[in-house]
Image: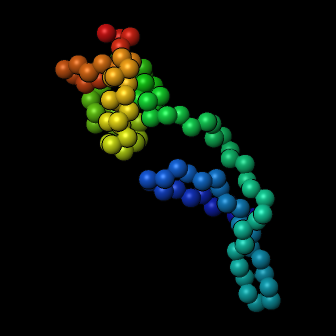
Amino acid sequence: MLLMSVEHRAAAPIHEVALELRVHGEIRTLEVLDRPIAPVGVGPAISAAERIEQALLESVEPMGVHQLRKACRMRMASLCDALAGLTDDGRVVKCDDGYQLATNV
């Protein structure tokens, strides 16, 4: 049995696909198994806002947008949307050096 992982930069990941090598005479094919493979070590997905808050919590200094994008591994548009929501909610504040949690002010 083979496990195929599929990743796409702009889409949510799918679970692994189980494949099996089947031999029909001289023909060999890979066939998808009917039973799904349970994800290994995959926890619940966390929101963009939660990822940003976690990155800011782990940082000792305010973080700029580019630092946050790299730490959170997300698209710039998603990051900016989530930052705007966090700022509007008062959970994150923008300062001269970047963004920080409101509790650190």
Q: Position of residue 62 (x, y in %)?
A: 29, 21
Q: Quadrant of the N terminus?
A: bottom right
Coloring scheme used? rainbow
Q: Is residue 59 left or right of residue 94?
A: right
Q: Quadrant of the C terminus?
A: top left
Q: Position of residue 76 (x, y in %)?
A: 32, 42
Q: Residue 55, located in which quarter of the rendered image?
A: top left
Q: Residue 26, located in which quarter of the rendered image?
A: bottom right
Q: Residue at x 60, y 53 (%)?
A: 14
Q: Is residue 83 left or right of residue 23?
A: left
How many circles with numbers are drawn on the protein?
0
Q: Residue at x 72, y 72 (%)?
A: 31
Please say whether residue 18 is visible from this viewpoint: yes
Q: Residue at x 48, y 56 (%)?
A: 8
Residue sitting nearer the eye, 89 or 54: 89
Please say whether residue 70 is visible from this viewpoint: no
9 above or below 83?
below
Q: Position of residue 75 (x, y in %)?
A: 36, 45
Q: Is residue 25 left or right of residue 89?
A: right
Q: Residue at x 55, y 51 (%)?
A: 13
